[in-house]
Image (cartoon, rainbow, N blue to C red):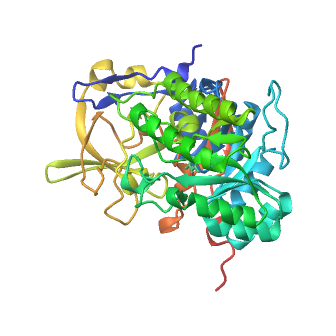
Amino acid sequence: MTSAGLEKQTDTLTDGISRGIRRQIAGVGVAQLAQTYGTPLYVYDALMIRRRCRDLAAWDTIRFAQKACSNLAVLNLIRSEGVMVDAVSTGEIHRAEKAGYPTHAVLMQSSDGLPPVHPIVYTADIFDRDSLDVVAKLGLPVNCGSADMLEQLAARVPGAHVTLRVNPGFGHGHSQKTNTGGEGSKHGIWHEEIPDVLRRAEWAGLCVSGLHMHIGSGADLVHLAEVAEALERVAHEIGRSLTTISAGGGLPVPYKPNEVHADLGSYFSLWDATRKRLEERFGHRIRLEIEPGRYLTAEAGSVITEVRAIKRQGTKKYLLVDAGFNTLARPVLYGSWHPMSLCPEKESQNQTARGPAEEEIVEDVVVGGPLCESGDIFTQQEGGFVETRALPATSVGDYLVIETCGAYGFVMASNYNSKPLPAEVLIDDGQARLVRTRQTPDDLVRGETV
Ligand SMILES: *Cc1c(COP(=O)(O)O)cnc(C)c1O
């Protein structure tokens, strides 16, 4: 498979910092995208999303954690790949329905004795009042992260089937803020409470048919084996009512040049072995789910920004662009590192206006945004330490492409400083399509009164 958009003209220096000029995303010119749709702009490559969905074909169910990237066009694309969806709020249930997901269970082709699958599952540690209403009205299955949820659900939907989200007592997040297991995490039902919770579920008349652990396991297979073992122990406590197990999300993607994808084959084999042992023990088929967010969309997304000012502060050179942490919050929230490349403003003249020699001039720059806030820096480590990035020489009016932004990108964008939410574009088969318009000044004050 070839895709012009995947062949980035980026090379890597020995210090692991990438530099580069990037003129196209998924076969469409960066400058053309910026000039047609304005900046800052989110752009997604449909081919990359499809490829990532297909990577996980071995699993019985792939369930997209839509909080990573919930644009309707992206959800629709993912749905058309046979991928189910997870919703963590009423708003996400609404999005799933709008993107064409049915609210009732469906029998999958070639399901081979497996139980039918629910396209939409609600996962949370609480029901707010509106989500309990919607879940009850639509009869959606629920993945419960607290015992209180069980009783609240039982009061509204007697005999409901539920999945328990278990905190096995240990965790493994890529940042303190993304660790999803252990005492330091609010997520899931504590493993030692399971016998008590099962009694409460039975008392309330619920059927526990699913078991779920999402603890941010990353690429570490030793750790993953511990997670699978912990899940198996809890599965034994639940017993024969169990028909589905979920390995949760947490599949990593490479952000830095020296990072790699997880070994998907080993990842699957380990969980498949767990599933097979449970099938043998219970004497029926068990559906095996995976619930990726980041993995399906992160690499497909980029933010195109325009360089609006270049200045020196003492010894440091600053590149100020029109995207800030209102556009992409991961650097300020987690100190996340995103690849960056530059695109000269004038696509057609790029050969004459700028020779190859000039492209190789690499400067160490700090990249910041427009917000009145000193933390509005894209090149920062966790804790807010400002660092520099080696990038080709640039001028005001050029475009800076921030890459690997397709997960936890747009969905975390805000209106801080009364900046409009950016537009989103999906590129499929070389065709760019606007899938969300940029907010207008009136959008910013909608619902307010003087
Ligand atoms: C966020 C989340 C995921 C997805 O996590 P990724 O790290 O993006 O794969 C999966 N399941 C649940 C319950 C989540 O909250």
Numbered marks: total: 0
Q: Quadrant of the C terminus?
A: bottom right
Q: Position of residue 56 (x, y in %)?
A: 61, 27
Residue at image coords 71%, 35%: 287
The answer to whether residue 149 is visible is yes
Residue at image coords 37%, 55%: 176
Q: Between residue 100 and residue 434, name the one nearer to us.
A: 100
The answer to whether residue 442 is visible is no
Q: Position of residue 199 (x, y in %)?
A: 67, 63
Q: Position of residue 39 (x, y in %)?
A: 52, 47
Looking at the image, the residue that sits furthest to the left is 315
Q: Is residue 210 left or right of residue 188?
A: right
Q: Say which quarter of the image contains residue 130.
A: bottom right
Residue at image coords 77%, 60%: 206
Q: Is residue 301 left or right of residue 148?
A: left
Q: Say which quarter of the image contains residue 343.
A: top left
Looking at the image, the residue that sits furthest to the top is 1
Residue at image coords 48%, 20%: 7
Q: Between residue 334 and residue 341, name the one nearer to us.
A: 334
Q: Between residue 318 and residue 96, name the one nearer to us.
A: 96
Q: Position of residue 24 (x, y in %)?
A: 51, 27
Q: Quadrant of the N terminus?
A: top right
Q: Is residue 117 above or below residue 268?
A: below
